[in-house]
Image (cartoon, rainbow, N blue to C red):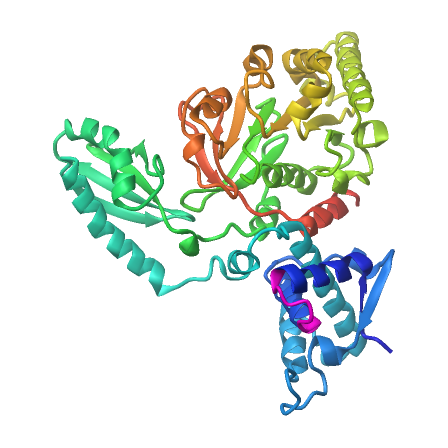
Amino acid sequence: MANISISEEDENIILQVRSLGFRTPDAAKYRVLRLALAKSLRIETPPESGLDTIEKKGRDYDLEVVTGFGKSENEKGFHDFDDAVRALLSVYHQEDLFASDQEYKKLLQRHIRRGLREIRTSWNAGHNFINWLREELFQGLTSDNAQLAVATETDLLLDALAEISVHAAIRDIKQGIRLDRYALYLANINHLDNLKKGLSKLSFRLGLPENAITLSGNKEAGVVNLDIPRSPEHWKTVAPARLNEWADLPHPEKLPVWLGQTVLGENFNMDLAEAPHVLLAGATGSGKTVCLHSLICSLLKTQSQEKLQFALIDPKGTELNAYAKLPNLFGGFVAKSTLEAANMLDELVETMEARNRLFVEMGVRDIDEASKKSALPRIVVVVEELADLLMQSRELETPLVRLAQKARSTGIHLVLATQRPDAATFSGLLRSNIPVRIALRVQKHTESSIILDQKGAEALLGKGDMLIKLTDQLEPIRVHGAKIGDSEIALAIQKFGR
């Protein structure tokens, strides 16, 4: 009897990795299965029980293939790692899996299926598989090389500063998640202008892309902060588990949203109810959709069905499918077609007007006062690709503008995401009524200006690196997002559905 079962989709990704990743179509399948296990074990939350269900069966694998169970060392290509794998899973799940073969096999199957799913969703078959492995399995591991890199960079930085006629003393160095922050004391205030004008030369001298180095203020007199990105192999990752830890804390905000960690590793969250609307934009591959998942999942983890509804519009029909089974979706479905989106937006406008009429009857001003007398859920409206939506029907901007102008008091909040932040997509009417902006990496400084009303997003590092401009902040805050995957989404939905 087989021990591990996988779906047809799982089997297909194994074949893809063999032929396009390893470039060896006849490579042993156990190598892909074990990579999938390793990938799943890098995720701090356990795989969901839904992985036990297989709708379209692929094939079965025995333990002797998956873990080498029962194999002797002299059998070519095989070793018996079963005890080691069983021990790893016992520690991970905090239970003795040596005492139960059935439980061991069940959890092993879940991990392998989750790992294969993660490979399927995060690796593009046209991209280098070795680079994917390095980023997904080894990124964030500590090394003395990172400290050595900082020491070398310090010497180079001081030499480069002297070349642009800036004489500074390094007061402090803080290692962030992806960059190092140098606190520079400038003895001569005139050197500040030299430093601002010479940032591109510093980047060139340190072997970094133009505009990679950024300058910010410091509370200490005569001191400025210089943020210098590290090379990707020395980046630390923001683990999705940080979202779970944050969600377990008490939150005074009405709609708390967690977006990641600041450059120095502190949690960053905001209140969507106070925003009250958000524009989220970034180029393809910048991490825009993952950031959107983080926003949605943080709400799922901190809110209840009685207090929150989601109205989801996904013109591409691919990015928000995971939320299609949420128990209290506005309208009961994810809108994908132009007609569905138009009907949903019209219904939201009518809901807004109906709530305003109700407030007049109740003698209250907004949803906060109304909620003391009658339970009314807030509604978060998510449009996954605004540009695609408006390209199909420009008329849909009208209900969006009405909601942006009037919906705050009724507890309806917009989250508009796009990978094409241009004036045609984000018009003046929308821009003036959506104060909170989240910019991930873009191609041109003009796109950054559309999102943030200033440059900066063109110099971001990608992969979730973002600038967040809040209504009460003069300067945007730099935040690194976590990679929220299918497993985290499934667990958040499961918690919200209880």
Residue stretch rendered in magenta on the structure: 21-30
**Residue 484, image x and y in percent?**
62, 47
The answer to whether residue 127 is left or right of residue 314 is left
**Residue 341, image x and y in percent?**
78, 22
Work out whether 57 lies above or below 320. Answer: below
Q: Please tell me which residue lies in front, 218 or 447.
A: 447
Q: Please, what is the dominant secondary structure of the magenta stretch?
A: loop
Total label count?
A: 0
The residue shown at (78%, 69%) is 106
The answer to whether residue 372 is left or right of residue 233 is right
Is residue 29 located in the magenta-colored stretch of the structure? yes
The residue shown at (68%, 20%) is 391
Which image quarter holds the C terminus?
A: top right
Work out whether 312 lies above or below 396. Answer: below
Work out whether 91 lies above or below 220. Answer: below
Residue 319: image quadrant is top right
